[in-house]
Image: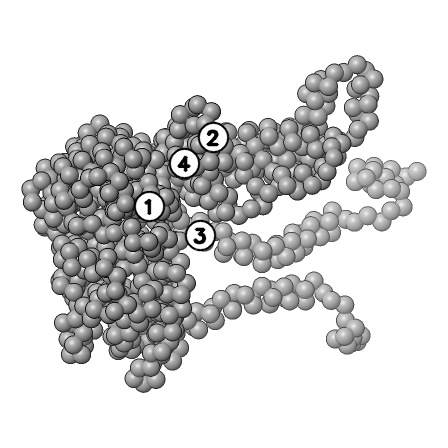
């Protein structure tokens, strides 16, 4: 074998080519890569342009509004970070942030727990299981305007059904929407009620993909039901769980109608979340800059939370 | 040379990209084209006046208003088209449309909307309309004082077309059952409230839940009823005046005595109506046409007399809803001609009993369809003459009132009073004033 042939063979081997294969010269390969890149670029360009128009323009416009003292019609004067500073130094903002935090925690984990419980229950063989599944979806399917009106009539006045039941049981007449603490709890329970079907469906789908032989093997190894749940079920549905948490976190933080239709953010701001505060600041106080600044702060917080949970998804995938 | 026909030539990447670019440009070009179609969009094409109206009453109202608007036939073949704008986010709807030059030429809208858009240079003054109303006799037909709040230094910002009054209503049978006289002043209001409470009814019915501004209006009404108000005569914030403090202390007294429903703070307007219908509300501030609204036309719900404040003042509040013209119009003459025409046709709406507000024209108040209801007559006779706007103690409306009406500061204030959370009237008013100052345009 000549030295030239040996060098060529090593070179081909390094490039991962079999003997006799034609291969392409490095120059040709990089040329193809550049062309491919250009093709991708041109193929993507229309979508990118549309995305920029649909998302980028409003975002830039909102950024302009957040840094100016104008209104919905006029940009006004540039005020830099003044709107952000005034929002961050406002007690109303922090009160709303606190409520949003609790609303999100209860909304995400409350609906997840209820959804998980029902998904596990529906996995067992119960009569008319599919009918129950459809019925349990109703809170999610029914328009929020309808369900909030129904809830309002259930709890709003001292003579509504739920306060009447409480009174009948000797618990006095709770003012579910008029007492600040009770109103907060009512709104959170309403959110859980509206959201659990979504969680139930996500978890049901994840559970459906779990191989039942895993449980049989665990049983044979003497694992208890609780151990099977904590050591098999939860880890196997972890990826789906994290995704549902991300989505529900976004749903809760951005949830306007659930709160606004039921309480309007009251009484005395007890149920004012950040999105309600942003809405009221822009459309009731006509203070566009501070309102948009609140929305920006919400978006940034949501991005951070989403990134953290997304990392958890990747981690659970690796595991 | 190998020449292939176009049909047999392979579809190259370059061709594909070209086609993609062409396809992508279609919506962009269409979007650009759309701009020219709506240019001068205030009126659309061919001298058509675009009239935007709100759902002021049942859908039958909008059907009737549409018929009136579309019956307009002006000079130079001018016409009008009619569009309903929902109350949800209405200000944003108007703002976006005006900013993109696709807004109306003439519209109804929020009570202070005309002043907001005037501040932004979008409103066409109605002075020529007023001149025409003077020449056709309609000017003298206005109820006293309804036009004055719209006159600014530069001209008439809008023209009123209906009055959303706040008046006291009562349920006659409850007062008879409680064997108590109708309130004529604050002490008797307190006494009547105590008597009604024994029957499980409330003597100062109100509500401040989602979308319900009656709680806010009750607070301002009581201030105005005591000779106070949010502003002083020069239009400056004046919430901490003695009359306001006294009025709010009195409301706190009503709350602490259980004369205000403890759940009122969360009541929507529907909840409030239900309280009236169910006989839980004995006396309280509400709008025109309450029997029709709550569904009790038995004659048991009646308009009360205005009550007198401790210093002899007697007043209520009114929201003069108005029609405004915008600068972006196909023809200002057509806009004015349409507005004069529309004002002349308003009587049809009251003839058909579609309105839950007072008319602004005396001739309409004299229509049998309106005057047959003694409650209407009483409101016109006893309440309209003492009605003041949200600008009280001042008289001219302005853009700042939009931030007051329905704004967070007033809402928080009302709710803090109705829940009894406010430690005292002065502190609550101080917080209200600070909140309002932070959002008012300097």
Query: Could you tell me if residue B73 is visible in this image?
Result: yes
- Residue B224 vs residue A55, the one in the foreground: B224
Please tell me in which quadrant of the rendered image residue A152 appears: top left
Distance CA(mark 2)–CA(mark 1): 23 Å
The residue tagged 2 is A165
The residue tagged 1 is B276
Residue at 36% from the left image edge and 30% from the top image edge: A179
In the rendering, which numbered label is found on residue A159? 4
Question: Quick one: SS at disc 2?
Answer: helix
Q: Relative to residue B429, is residue A280 drawn left or right? A: right
Please tell me in which quadrant of the rendered image residue A217 appears: top right
Q: Nearer the viewer, mark 2 or mark 3?
A: 2
Q: Residues within 10 Å of mark 4 (few under 14, many from 20)?
A: some
Q: Relative to residue B14, is residue B407 drawn left or right? A: left
Tell me residue B198's x, y (percent): 27, 32
Badge 1 and badge 3 in a common chain = no
Residue at 22% from the left image edge and 33% from the top image edge: B194
Distance CA(mark 4)–CA(mark 2): 9 Å
Tag count in the figure?
4
Distance CA(mark 4)–CA(mark 1): 13 Å
- Badge 1 vs badge 3, beta-carbon distance below 8 Å: no
Badge 2 and badge 1 in a common chain = no
Badge 4 and badge 1 in a common chain = no
Distance CA(mark 1)–CA(mark 3): 46 Å
- Residue at the far bottom in the pictured view: B76
Q: Relative to residue B416, is residue A36 drawn left or right? A: right
- Badge 2 vs badge 1, beta-carbon distance below 8 Å: no
């Amino acid at each position: 074998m000549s030295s030239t042939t040996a060098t060529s063979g090593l070179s081909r081997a390094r490039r991962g080519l079999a003997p006799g294969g034609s291969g392409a010269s490095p120059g040709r390969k990089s040329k193809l890569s550049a062309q491919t890149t250009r093709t991708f670029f041109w193929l993507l360009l229309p979508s990118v342009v549309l995305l920029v128009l649909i998302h980028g323009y409003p975002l830039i416009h909102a950024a302009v509004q957040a840094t100016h003292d104008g209104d919905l019609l006029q940009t006004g004067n540039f005020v830099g970070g003044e709107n952000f500073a005034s929002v961050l130094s406002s007690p109303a903002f922090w009160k709303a942030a606190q409520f949003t935090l609790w609303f999100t925690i209860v909304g995400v984990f409350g609906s997840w727990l209820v959804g998980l419980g029902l998904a596990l229950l529906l996995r067992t063989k119960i009569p008319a299981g599919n009918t129950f599944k459809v019925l349990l979806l109703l809170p999610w399917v029914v328009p929020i305007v309808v369900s909030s009106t129904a809830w309002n009539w259930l709890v709003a006045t001292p003579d509504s059904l739920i306060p009447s039941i409480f009174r009948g049981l000797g618990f006095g007449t709770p003012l579910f929407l008029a007492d600040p603490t009770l109103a907060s709890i009512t709104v959170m329970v309403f959110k859980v009620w509206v959201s659990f079907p979504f969680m139930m469906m996500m978890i049901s789908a994840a559970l459906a993909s779990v191989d039942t032989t895993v449980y049989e093997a665990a049983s044979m190894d003497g694992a208890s039901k609780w151990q099977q749940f904590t050591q098999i079920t939860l880890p196997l549905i972890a990826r789906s769980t994290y995704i549902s948490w991300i989505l529900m976190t976004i749903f809760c933080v951005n949830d306007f109608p659930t709160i606004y239709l039921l309480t309007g953010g009251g009484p005395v701001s007890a149920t004012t979340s950040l999105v309600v505060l942003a809405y009221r600041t822009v459309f009731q106080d006509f203070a566009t800059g501070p309102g948009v600044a609140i929305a920006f702060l919400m978006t940034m917080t949501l991005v951070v939370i989403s990134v953290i949970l997304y990392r958890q998804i990747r981690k659970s995938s690796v595991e | 040379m190998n020449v292939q026909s176009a049909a047999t030539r392979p579809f190259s990447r370059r061709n594909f990209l070209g086609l993609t670019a062409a396809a992508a440009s279609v919506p962009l070009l269409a979007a650009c084209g759309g701009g020219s179609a709506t240019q001068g969009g205030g009126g659309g094409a061919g001298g058509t006046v675009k009239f935007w109206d709100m759902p002021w009453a049942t859908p039958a109202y909008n059907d009737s208003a549409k018929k009136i608007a579309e019956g307009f036939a002006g000079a130079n073949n001018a016409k009008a088209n009619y569009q309903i704008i929902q109350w949800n986010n209405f200000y944003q709807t108007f703002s976006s449309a005006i900013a993109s030059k696709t807004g109306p030429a003439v519209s109804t809208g929020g009570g202070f909307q005309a002043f907001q858009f005037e501040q932004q240079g979008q409103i066409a003054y109605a002075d020529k309309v007023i001149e025409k109303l003077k020449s056709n006799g309609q000017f003298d037909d206005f109820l006293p004082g309804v036009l004055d709040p719209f006159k600014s230094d530069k001209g008439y910002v809008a023209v009123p077309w209906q009055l959303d009054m706040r008046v006291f209503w009562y349920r006659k049978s409850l007062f008879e059952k409680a064997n108590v006289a109708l309130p004529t002043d604050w002490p008797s209001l307190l006494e009547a409230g105590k008597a009604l409470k024994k029957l499980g009814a409330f003597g100062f019915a109100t509500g401040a839940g989602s979308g319900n501004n009656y709680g806010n209006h009750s607070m301002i009404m009581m201030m105005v009823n005591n000779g106070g108000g949010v502003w002083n005569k020069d239009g400056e914030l004046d919430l901490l005046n003695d009359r306001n403090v006294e009025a709010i202390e009195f409301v706190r007294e009503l709350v602490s005595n259980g004369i205000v429903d403890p759940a009122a703070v969360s009541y929507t307007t529907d909840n409030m109506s239900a309280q009236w219908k169910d006989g839980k509300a004995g006396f309280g501030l509400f709008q025109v046409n309450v029997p029709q609204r709550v569904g009790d036309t038995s004659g048991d719900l009646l308009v009360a007399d205005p009550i007198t404040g401790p210093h002899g003042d007697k007043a209520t509040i009114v929201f003069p809803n108005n029609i405004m013209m915008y600068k972006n119009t196909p023809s200002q003459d057509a806009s004015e001609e349409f507005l004069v025409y529309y004002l002349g046709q308003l009587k049809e709406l009251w003839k058909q009993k579609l309105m839950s507000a007072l008319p602004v024209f005396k001739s309409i108040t004299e229509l049998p369809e309106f005057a047959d209801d003694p409650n209407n007559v009483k409101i016109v006779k006893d309440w309209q003459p003492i009605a003041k706007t949200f600008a009280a103690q001042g008289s001219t409306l302005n853009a700042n009132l939009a931030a007051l009406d329905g704004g967070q500061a007033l809402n928080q204030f009302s709710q803090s009073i109705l829940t009894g959370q406010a430690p005292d009237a002065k502190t609550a008013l101080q917080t209200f004033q600070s909140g309002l100052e932070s959002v008012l345009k300097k």
